[in-house]
Amino acid sequence: MRKYKILLIIVLHGVALNNIMAQNDTLSYFKKIYAQDSMEVFNGGALEIDNSYVVITNTLNLYTLKSEVFLRYINRINGETLDAKSLGNNEERMASYYDKSIIKNKEGMIIAMERCYENDGMNCLRKLRLVKVNKYGEIEDDKEYGEEGAETVCVQINKTQDEGYIIGGWKFTYNDGANPYLLKLDSIGNVEWERIYPTEIIGAALYVYPTYDGGYIFSGYRGKGNPFAPYQNCYVTRVDSVGNVVWDKVYQEDTESILNSGGGITPVPNTTHYLLTYDYGKDEKRHQFVGEINDDGEIIWSKDYQYPQFTTPYFTEVYFDSEGGFISVAHQANENNPNRTEPFIMRFNSEGDTLWTKRIAIEPSENQYIRGFLATSDGGYLLTGLSYEGPYAWEIKIDSLGNTCWQTGCDSTYVEVVGLEELSGLAEAATVLVSPNPAQDELRVNIEGKTLNYWEIYNLEGRKLSSYTAAVTDISHLVSGVYIVKVYDTEGKEYIGKILIMN
């Protein structure tokens, strides 16, 4: 198993009221950074399997150029690596870059990878490699797609109605350049059909989904203009069950920027509509378009936002809430250093109005890039990515409001829980700090913006062990284990969390 040098470890826990012992009521927060000497290390997408998160981790030895791809199983509570399964190593470069290049199937997972089969020392041509593994990371099947003299790359893979798979990406040849590409596979990975959709200069399919009628819809970017600095316009294409074009639309054709990342679509739940997002340049400013299109590609509503040096990572998912709102991630320049890029998270209502945006701090002095965005069963989100300064990989676990340890200090417990009176208004909840966690000998309790009345410690069977009025208390008499803490303010409101004591 690969041993990682851990540069930074933070563990936080928060527990919501109602059913305190239920697993999905426990919110976990952590931030982990991984690096290796003389190695590039970066993360791709992630899944949740049983009690672990499975993260694709890529390494490249800077001296030998030998690369390796791992499925790294990490603890859902603290981010610790539990196991790492190699998907093969090669003297040539091999990697899995994108958020949606890993999906679940009935037996385990399907991972789309790239293998460099022709390398001139500066550039390489890649073939698509599809690996089927069981839930333990053991390889059960391994297939390669693509031909000599061409490059075949997968950005997104999705399951289809007939239990097969649809893959979107691009295919490059020296004669035709790079063009949007779809590949349809049956349930065991045999090719049913493949299609290239020619563009003027350059293009890619970045998102692809099956449609209700057995066809497919995909989106991405197309370049036009100067071959060395093309405009990259957002497009959406609808095709039938064998890849024939039904309709095709290009959005924001009057762009003035060559830095567009293309268009992203996501099916709107319980409809035949799609959320469309893309960023573009205009008047020397960065803009984000957010809108909803119908099954014919017509815009139902749209919003336009302006950001300084904003980019949307085209390889990440958008998630919807029960009220039709949605949450997504992006990149933006650091407010104190415009040459530094950092991720942030945005929440919108069902009509595209922003409810809030929050920056996600990894290492503010370094450029950070998101590679994966996963909604988790505890109601939070797992973000994975990399920094080129290391280069190193990182994971950060946040809650549904974008909170994580950097807001309270990474040696603290961030408990975003509410009393019964406040369950309908989470934004008004007080913040309870219980530190350190894990605790040894002594525990400190504070309610931000409130006055502490008293607090109690319970074991996991619900039996009260002690009651305290002091904010700092000796706990050296308690044996090591997990305990429930109930905190009461002077207004009679109750807050509940968990701590780990290691005496």
Image: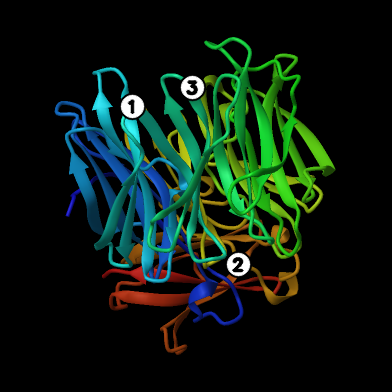
Q: CA distance from mark 2 to mark 3?
A: 57 Å
Q: Tag on residue 234?
A: none
Residue neighbourhood size for the residue with mark 3, other residues' Cα within 10 Å, grouped as few (<14), some (14–19), many (≥20)? some
Q: Quadrant of residue 48?
A: bottom left
Comes first in the chain, label 2 or label 1: 1
Comes first in the chain, label 2 or label 3: 3
Q: Which residue is mark 1?
A: 149
Q: CA distance from mark 2 to mark 1?
A: 57 Å
Asked if one can make out residue 53 in the rendered structure from this viewpoint, the answer is no
Amino acid type, mark 2: Val
- Vertical order, 282 against 295 (above or below): above
Amino acid type, mark 3: Asp
Q: Nearer the viewer, mark 2 or mark 1?
A: 1
Q: Position of residue 386 (x, y in %)?
A: 39, 37
Q: Which residue is mark 3?
A: 176
Report the front residue among 325 and 124.
Answer: 124
Amino acid type, mark 1: Gly
